[in-house]
C-alpha cells in the first residue's frame, strides 16, 4: 500500500501544473493548517532549482514581488527558466558560486538540496533571507506557485514522501569578475561573500611581479596592489565539507601601461609640464591632458575649496594668493574601467616679506600662507653657524643675541624657496 501511495504521488508531481490549477491552494497544501504561505500569484516557467539559483543570483525580472499578504507576479531571467535550459539538480554541486558546507545550522545555509523516493524526486529549497532565527524556507514545485514553509514542510513531506539520501547544505559565495583593471600604484579590493563553513585561499597563478597582496590571503576579501604593467591571474579556492572537492574562481588582473600626463598654462606663462605639485601664480590656470587613445577623464577635487570647471581632458580654475587645490585624476576606458590614477596639487604661497628690517630684537615673515615655514638666518661676512627655525606667518623670531652685521634670511616651504632677503642686524 505504501508503494502505491508513492506511485500516485509521483504521478501527481509529474503532472503538477498540467493536471492542477496554479491557484489550487488545496492541492499545493497552502494554508495555516499546513504552516505554508503562497508568495506568488503566478506559477511561471521555472522549477525549484531555477528559482533557488535566481533567488541568490539576482535572477528575478524587475517587478517581481514575493509577498505573502498580496502575492504578486514572480518571473526569472531566461537562464533560470525551464525553456531556457535552466539549472538542474546538479547545479549547486557543480557551480563555483556555491560551496557545500557541513555542521552548520539552518540559519547559516542558503540552499538545501534533497532527494525523495519519488519519480524525479530531486528538490532544491532556499532559506528565506528575511528570517534568521528558526528560519523559513521557500520552494517552487514544477508549475506550482512559490510557497514559503517550515524546513520540514515541503510539498513532498506533507505528502509523506521519504528521503533516499541526506540533505546537502550549500552557501552562496557570489563571484568575482572575469577581468579587472588595476592601475599601477593603486590598491583594489577583490571580494566574495563571507559565509560560515566556507574557507578561502587566494594565490597568484599568473605572471609574478604584476600585482601583490596587501592583505591576508585566507579571507573572503583580499586587497591587491598594481606593481608593474602587465597581465596576470589570481585564483581563489573555496572549501567547505571535508572530502568534497573545493570550488575555484579565477580573475585576470590587468595593470594597464597608462600614465596620466599633460601641461598647464598660467596667467603669465604657458606649456609647463604637469607635476604632482605645481607652484602657480595668482590668476587663471588651465590644464590639458594629452594621452593617445584616451579621452575619458574624471577630475575629483579632494583638498581645497577653489571652484573649477573640467571637461574630459581639460580643467580650469582661478588661483588665489596663498591658496591651494588638489585633484585626483582618473583616466578611464570607453567601458568606464579605471586605467590610471594621478594626484596633482596646485599651490600659491602668496607674497612674502621680512619685517622689521633693519631690526635689533626680532623679525617676522609677513605672508598670506597659513602653514609652517622653515626659516634660516645665514651670516654673510662672519663664520658663525646658520640658525634654523620653524615658524608661521607673523611669528616673532628673537635675534637679540646675533652680532651686529648683515645676514641672509631664507624661507622654505618644503623644497621650495619662497623668500631670500638681506637682513641688517642693529645693536
Image (spheres, rainbow, N blue to C red):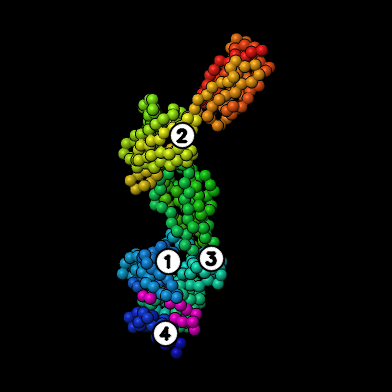
Q: CA distance from mark 1 to mark 2?
A: 48 Å
Lower sequence index among marks 4 and 1: 4
Lower sequence index among marks 3 and 2: 3
Location of the C terminus by quadrant is top right
Is 36 magenta? The answer is yes
Q: Going by the image, does 122 lie left or right of 109?
A: left
Q: CA distance from mark 4 to mark 3?
A: 32 Å
Q: Secondary structure at mark 2?
A: strand
Residue for badge 3: 108
Residue 139 in view here: no
**Looking at this view, is 396 or 402 the one in front?**
396
Is mark 3 in CB contact (under 8 Å) with mark 2? no
Q: Secondary structure at mark 3?
A: helix
Mark carried by residue 345: 2
Residue shown at 44% from the left, 64% from the top: 56
Is mark 4 in CB contact (under 8 Å) with mark 3? no
Lower sequence index among marks 4 and 2: 4
Lower sequence index among marks 4 and 3: 4
Mark carried by residue 26: 4
Amino acid at each position: 500500500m505504501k508503494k502505491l501511495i508513492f506511485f500516485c504521488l509521483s504521478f501527481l508531481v509529474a503532472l503538477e501544473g498540467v493536471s492542477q490549477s496554479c491557484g489550487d491552494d488545496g492541492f499545493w497544501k497552502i494554508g495555516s493548517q499546513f504552516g505554508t504561505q503562497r508568495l506568488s500569484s503566478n506559477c511561471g516557467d521555472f522549477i525549484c532549482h531555477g528559482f533557488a539559483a535566481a533567488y541568490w543570483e539576482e535572477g528575478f525580472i524587475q517587478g517581481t514581488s514575493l509577498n505573502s499578504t498580496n502575492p504578486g507576479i514572480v518571473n526569472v531571467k531566461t537562464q533560470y527558466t525551464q525553456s531556457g535550459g535552466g539549472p538542474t539538480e546538479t547545479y549547486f554541486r557543480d557551480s563555483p558560486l556555491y560551496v557545500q558546507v557541513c555542521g552548520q545550522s539552518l540559519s547559516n545555509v542558503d540552499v538545501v538540496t534533497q532527494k525523495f523516493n519519488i519519480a524525479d524526486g530531486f528538490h532544491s529549497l532556499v532559506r528565506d533571507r528575511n528570517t534568521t532565527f528558526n528560519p523559513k524556507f521557500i520552494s517552487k514545485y514544477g508549475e506550482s506557485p512559490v510557497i514559503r514553509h517550515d524546513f520540514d514542510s515541503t510539498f513532498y513531506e506533507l505528502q509523506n514522501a521519504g528521503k533516499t539520501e541526506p540533505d546537502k547544505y550549500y552557501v552562496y559565495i557570489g563571484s568575482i569578475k572575469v577581468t579587472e583593471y588595476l592601475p599601477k600604484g593603486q590598491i583594489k579590493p577583490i571580494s566574495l561573500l563571507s559565509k560560515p563553513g566556507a574557507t578561502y585561499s587566494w594565490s597568484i597563478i599568473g605572471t609574478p611581479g604584476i600585482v601583490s597582496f596587501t592583505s591576508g590571503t585566507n579571507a573572503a576579501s583580499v586587497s591587491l596592489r598594481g606593481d608593474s604593467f602587465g597581465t596576470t591571474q589570481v585564483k581563489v579556492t573555496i572549501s567547505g565539507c571535508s572530502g568534497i572537492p573545493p570550488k575555484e574562481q579565477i580573475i585576470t588582473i590587468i595593470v594597464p601601461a597608462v600614465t596620466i600626463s599633460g601641461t598647464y598654462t598660467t596667467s603669465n606663462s604657458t606649456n609647463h609640464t604637469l607635476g604632482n605639485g605645481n607652484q602657480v601664480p595668482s590668476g587663471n590656470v588651465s590644464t590639458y591632458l594629452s594621452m593617445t587613445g584616451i579621452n575619458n577623464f574624471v577630475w575629483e577635487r579632494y583638498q581645497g575649496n577653489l571652484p573649477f570647471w573640467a571637461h574630459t581632458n581639460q580643467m580650469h580654475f582661478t588661483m588665489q594668493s596663498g591658496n591651494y587645490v588638489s585633484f585626483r585624476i582618473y583616466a578611464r576606458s570607453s567601458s568606464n574601467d579605471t586605467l590610471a590614477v594621478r594626484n596633482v596639487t596646485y599651490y600659491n604661497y602668496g607674497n612674502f616679506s621680512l619685517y622689521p628690517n633693519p631690526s635689533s630684537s626680532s623679525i617676522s615673515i609677513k605672508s598670506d600662507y597659513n602653514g609652517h615655514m622653515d626659516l634660516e638666518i645665514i651670516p654673510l661676512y662672519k663664520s658663525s653657524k646658520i640658525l634654523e627655525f620653524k615658524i608661521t606667518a607673523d611669528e616673532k623670531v628673537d635675534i637679540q643675541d646675533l652680532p651686529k652685521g648683515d645676514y641672509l634670511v631664507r624661507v622654505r616651504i618644503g623644497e621650495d624657496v619662497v623668500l631670500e632677503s638681506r637682513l641688517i642686524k642693529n645693536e
